């Protein structure tokens, strides 16, 4: 199933469809509705061929190349230096360990992304950050929790990014962050998947998104996109 969901778009190493994931109450999520990804070119012909009509960029202003046309919702809130003085240093930033504190402090940031998904026209929606792991991972946890996907399947999806990004690090001659993150968590007696599961069980997704300004109609629209 994971290989079936993976999308080999040019320039992308960590793009995958969120369809086919098992629901707690039975059934599965719809295909070609939501796609998580690392940085993607909105003009890429493969997106249109796959049915994508909306692209949401979660990166900060200084990460975006000039002239990019898409919906831009920077998730980090980097202007809050008090928050990032704690979370931007060390490998905890490459894990869901910071999701809970971020959602508590900036619920409106994640809610804005979910609202953009809710209001998107028919067709596929891609949301992406730089590597498709952390910021895209946070949004993925929220939308899949909202849809009622089994937490174990959400954690498995999160862990797939570590596997997929190895090729990207190798291609760009960069440090394998996956290995460094694994060491960091192992020293603390846990794993990436366990941290993801702990985070999922701690999130009250509707409370978080309503605190960020979403309405019942917004939540229903996201569920409808993934569930039909």
Image (spheres, rainbow, N blue to C red):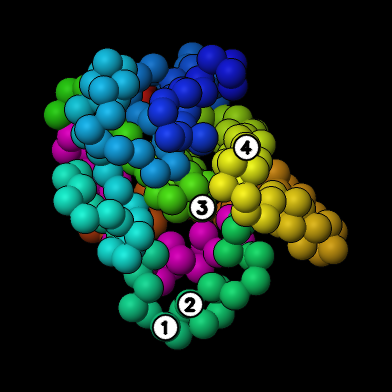
Q: Residue at x 21, y 55 (%)?
A: 66
Sequence order check, earlier mark of 4 and 2: 2
Please identify, in this view, whether the residue under mark 4 or under mark 2 is nearer the observer.
Answer: 4
The magenta-colored residue range is 96-120
Identify residue for label 1.
Answer: 81
Q: Is residue 2 left or right of residue 192?
A: left
Question: How far is the residue under mark 3 from the one under mark 2?
Answer: 14 Å
Q: Is residue 113 left or right of residue 27?
A: left
Q: Residue at x 31, y 17 (%)?
A: 50
Question: How far is the residue under mark 4 from the one under mark 1?
Answer: 32 Å
Do we see residue 26 in this rendering?
no
Identify residue for label 3.
Answer: 134
Q: Are marks 4 and 2 in contact (CB under 8 Å)?
A: no
Q: Are marks 1 and 2 in contact (CB under 8 Å)?
A: yes
In the image, residue 171 above or below residue 153: below
Specify the quadrant that holds the N terminus. top right
Sequence order check, earlier mark of 4 and 3: 3
Q: Name the one closer to the observer, 131 or 118.
A: 131
Identify residue for label 4.
Answer: 167
**Could you tell me which secondary element the residue under label 2 belongs to?**
helix
Identify residue for label 2.
Answer: 84
Specify the quadrant that holds the C terminus. top left
């Amino acid at each position: 199933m994971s290989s079936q969901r993976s999308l080999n778009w040019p320039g992308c190493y960590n793009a995958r469809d969120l369809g086919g994931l098992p629901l707690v109450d039975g059934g599965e999520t719809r295909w070609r509705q939501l796609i998580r990804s690392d940085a993607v070119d909105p003009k890429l012909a493969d997106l249109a061929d796959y049915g994508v009509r909306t692209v949401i960029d979660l990166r900060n202003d200084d990460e975006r190349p000039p002239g990019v046309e898409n919906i831009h919702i920077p998730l980090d809130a980097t202007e809050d230096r008090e928050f990032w003085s704690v979370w931007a240093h060390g490998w905890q930033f490459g894990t869901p360990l910071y999701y809970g504190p971020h959602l508590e402090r900036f619920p409106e940031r994640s809610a804005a992304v979910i609202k953009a998904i809710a209001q998107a026209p028919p067709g596929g929606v891609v949301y992406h950050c730089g590597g498709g792991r952390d910021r895209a991972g946070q949004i993925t946890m929220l939308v899949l929790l909202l849809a009622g996907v089994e937490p174990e399947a959400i954690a498995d999806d999160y862990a797939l990014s570590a596997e997929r990004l190895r090729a990207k690090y190798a291609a760009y001659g960069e440090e394998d962050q996956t290995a460094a993150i694994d060491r960091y968590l192992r020293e603390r007696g846990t794993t990436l998947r366990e941290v993801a599961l702990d985070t999922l069980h701690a999130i009250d997704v509707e409370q978080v998104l309503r605190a960020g300004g979403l309405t019942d109609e917004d939540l229903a629209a996201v569920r409808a996109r993934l569930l039909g």
